[in-house]
Image: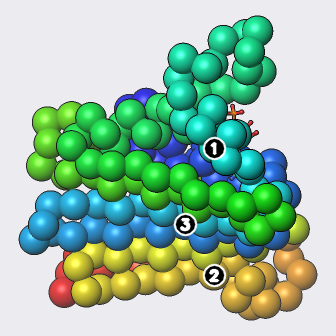
Amino acid sequence: MRELSLNILDIAQNSIAAGASLTEIVVAENTREKTLLIGIYDNGKGMTEEQVRNVQDPFFTTRTTRKVGMGIPLFKMAAEQTGGSFTITSEVGVGTRVEARFKTDSIDFTPLGDMSSTITTIVCMNEDKDFIYIRSVDDEKFEFSSAEIKAILDGVPLSEPSVMSWVEGYITEHTEQLFKN
Ligand SMILES: Nc1ncnc2c1ncn2[C@@H]1O[C@H](COP(=O)(O)OP(=O)(O)O)[C@@H](O)[C@H]1O
Ligand SMILES: [Mg+2]
């Protein structure tokens, strides 16, 4: 995938499909260590140990043995090819935690891409679910909560184009602020 935001979209969609009522997406950049952590944590239905093993294995993905896609193997590969690491932990009935660590100075590092648009899409297209997006650059942090936004909007649908563009602008503005300090 050309941008990590597309991987994040895919992994967050897994959380939604798993029935998560709350999904937390963390993007934490450390400019001194030149590392990026992406975490997607959900309270969905979870997976067994065997499922966790299988979903990480790209060779398990054939039409006959697996009816599912490549979201997890591709995200894992994107992290590992930079010299970073990847972990999934999951518990049935509790939820799933996906963490990918990247070395941003690797020539194989994929750019993050448009996170404002990605988060807006996830949040506004899944109004019945809650999301927390925590973006940090070194010690500067921005936390976005869909529940807070919904409270402010007081019943106005998030899928309204004007609301979506406001949400996207809000996230973009706060993200830019992280780099100004
Ligand atoms: N957060 C999650 N919670 C529960 N099950 C998950 C989660 N993420 C992935 N899975 C399981 O792993 C499978 C593989 O996920 P993925 O590699 O993204 O491919 P796809 O989403 O196309 O099926 C999913 O179909 C689902 O069964
Ligand atoms: Mg998927």
Q: Position of residue 101 (x, y in %)?
A: 33, 55
Q: Is residue 123 visible?
A: no
Residue 88 pos. (x, y %): 54, 53
Q: Relative to 171, is 122 above or below?
A: above
Q: Residues within 10 Å of mark 1 (few under 14, many from 20)?
A: some
Closer to the camera: disc 1 or disc 3?
Answer: 1
Give residue 25's mark: 3
Amino acid on which the number 1 mark rests in the picture: Val
Type of amino acid under label 3: Ile
Quarter of the image for residue 54 reads top right
Pointer 1: what residue? 52
Residue 66 is left or right of residue 181, and the answer is right
Residue found at x 19% / y 52%? 104
Q: Residue at x 54, y 66 (%)?
A: 25
> Within 8 Å: ligand 1 and the Cβ of disc 1?
no
The image shows a total of numbered marks equal to 3
Asked if the residue under mark 3 is in contact with the one under mark 2, i.e. CB atoms within 8 Å, the reply is no
Callout 2–callout 1 Cβ contact below 8 Å: no
- SS class of the residue under badge 1? helix
Tell me the tag on residue 145: 2
| Depth order, front residue of 117/62 | 62
Q: Between label 2 and label 1, give the one nearer the viewer.
A: 1
Residue name at image x 19 percent, y 86 percent: 181
Marks 2 and 1, how far apart at CA: 28 Å
Q: Nearer the viewer, mark 2 or mark 3?
A: 3
Identified by mark 2, the residue type is: Ser
| Picture quarter with the N terminus | top left
CA neighbours of label 2 inside 10 A, class few (<14), some (14 to 19), many (20+): some
Where ligand 1 lies, by quadrant? top right
